[in-house]
């Protein structure tokens, strides 16, 4: 079973992805366009042009997982518009994004602080 934890790294692929691509196509996008290692254990998050779905790719040490969430209603209200190809995101912001929320509008305290 896959879990989203604060210790993991999450990256948003800014440019829309052709959702006809499977695992091999998305791995190639990670290597060529994002200049990232898809076997590093990081999660890569993509959306389609109309922002009605999200795909997540992760390598777990034995193989790749490709997850898709297609929204039954509406579309993503927020997606970064940076000029970079890739943007890091926290697990809490990703969870908000998966529920079609706007992660830029919420405050999330740090994961831990020194006592």
Image (cartoon, rainbow, N blue to C red):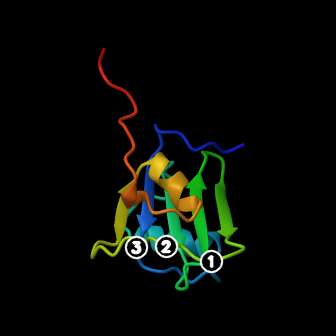
Instruction: Answer above or below: position of 75 versus 106.
Output: below
Quadrant of the rendering where the C terminus is positioned: top left
The mark that comes first in sequence, 3 or 2, is 3
Could you say which is closer to the camera, residue 99 or residue 2?
A: 99
Could you say which is closer to the camera, residue 65 or residue 110?
A: 110
**Where is residue 30 drawn, in percent x and y?**
46, 68
Would residue 16 be seen by someone viewing this image from the given angle? yes
Could you say which is closer to the camera, residue 63 or residue 45?
A: 45
Which is more foreground, mark 1 or mark 3? 1
Q: Are marks 1 and 3 in contact (CB under 8 Å)?
A: no
Instruction: Answer above or below: position of 58 versus 75.
Output: above
Residue that badge 2 annotates: 77
Q: Are marks 1 and 2 in contact (CB under 8 Å)?
A: yes
Residue that badge 3 annotates: 14
Quadrant of the rendering where the N terminus is positioned: top right
Instruction: Answer above or below: position of 112 versus 79.
Output: above
The mark that comes first in sequence, 1 or 3, is 3
SS for tag 1?
Answer: loop
Residue that badge 1 annotates: 74
């Amino acid at each position: 079973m896959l879990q989203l934890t604060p210790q993991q790294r999450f990256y948003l692929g800014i440019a829309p992805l052709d959702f006809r691509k499977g695992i091999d196509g998305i791995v190639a996008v990670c290597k060529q366009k994002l200049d990232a290692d898809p076997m590093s254990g990081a999660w890569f998050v993509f959306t389609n042009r109309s922002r009605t779905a999200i795909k997540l790719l992760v390598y777990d040490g034995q193989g790749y997982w490709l997850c898709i969430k297609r929204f039954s209603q509406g579309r993503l209200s927020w997606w970064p518009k940076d000029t970079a190809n890739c943007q890091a995101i926290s697990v809490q912001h990703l969870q908000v994004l998966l529920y079609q929320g706007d992660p830029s509008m919420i405050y999330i305290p740090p994961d831990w602080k020194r006592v």
